[in-house]
């Protein structure tokens, strides 16, 4: 997740602001968020890290919440998982992506804001739109391709399968402070996700036995 660079100069409250500084300030806010968490993040710390005056920041954002929401909105977050031609290969690619630098940074940002998500509806919505949903969409496509290839039964709940991967990763993140290592990420795919995805289709409940001639006629 990286802030999208801004270009040009914009007018704000009667002043012309150099928008090229916005990306630096957003990136600084996200970096501090990953390091110290939302509750300990301060505008003073952002100003000091970015070598900017606090007035410069407050001309752009009304406060910490406004800055963090804007930084998340402007972050690039569109993970794509390659089509390897098989579900097992695709899941190996997903496992590898869990341990890359961008996902590790996103994980620390997630830890940083988790306490604020419970009571800040706007932050929660932006987190869902910019971090959660893009990954869910990419994972759904992985399983949809497997259905099209005939590797997954058509009755499988693809949303639930997709949700399991970030849920298990988040569980590990919250208990250890780190995303799963490569070996554990691959184990999750091989021993949990793949077997669940490729299990035989559920057969419907068998119909009740037909009534006997006596039952049909009502005779005892």
Image: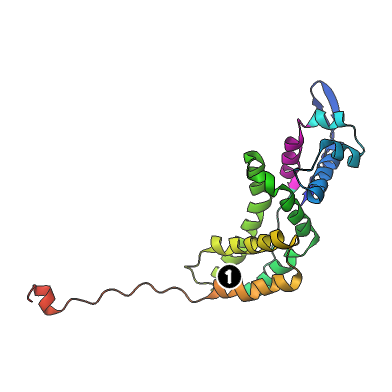
Circle 1 residues within 10 Å: few <14, some 14–19, many ≥20: many
Query: Is 151 on the left-hand or right-hand side of 62?
Result: left
Q: Which residue lies at the image location 74% right of the left edge and 39% below the top edge?
A: 70
**Which residue occupies the extreme left position in the image?**
219
Q: Quadrant of residue 93?
A: bottom right
Which residue does the image show at 71% across and 68% down from the upper left?
Answer: 95
Question: Could one spot residue 151 in this view of the protein?
Answer: no
Q: Residue at x 70, y 58 (%)?
A: 174
Residue under label 1: 146
Q: Is residue 193 left or right of residue 57?
A: left
Above-or-below relation of 136 to 91: above
Query: Percent position (x, y) of residue 24?
Result: 86, 42
Can you give x and y, in whole percent of width and height, for residue 161 in the image? 57, 65
The range drawn in magenta is 61-75
Tell whether 120 sits left or right of 177.
Answer: left
The verdict on residue 182 being magenta is no
């Amino acid at each position: 997740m990286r802030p999208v660079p801004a270009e040009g100069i914009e007018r704000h409250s009667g002043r012309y602001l150099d928008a090229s500084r916005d990306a630096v300030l957003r990136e600084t806010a996200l970096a501090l968020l990953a390091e110290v968490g939302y509750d300990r993040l301060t505008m003073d710390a952002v100003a000091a890290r970015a070598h900017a005056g606090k007035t410069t920041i407050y001309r752009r954002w009304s406060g910490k919440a406004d800055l963090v929401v804007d930084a998340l909105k402007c972050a690039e977050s569109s993970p794509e998982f390659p089509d390897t031609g098989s579900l097992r290969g695709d899941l190996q690619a997903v496992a590898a992506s869990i341990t890359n630098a961008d996902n590790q940074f996103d994980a620390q940002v997630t830890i940083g804001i988790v306490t604020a998500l419970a009571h800040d509806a706007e932050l929660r919505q932006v987190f869902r739109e910019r971090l959660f949903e893009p990954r869910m969409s990419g994972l759904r496509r992985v399983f949809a391709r497997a259905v099209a290839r005939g590797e997954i039964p058509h009755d499988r709940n693809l949303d639930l399968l997709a949700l399991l991967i970030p849920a298990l990763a988040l569980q590990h993140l919250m208990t250890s402070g780190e995303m799963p290592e490569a070996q554990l990420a691959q184990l999750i795919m091989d021993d949990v996700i793949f077997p669940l995805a490729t299990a035989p289709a559920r057969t419907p409940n068998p119909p009740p036995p037909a009534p006997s001639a006596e039952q049909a006629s009502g005779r005892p």
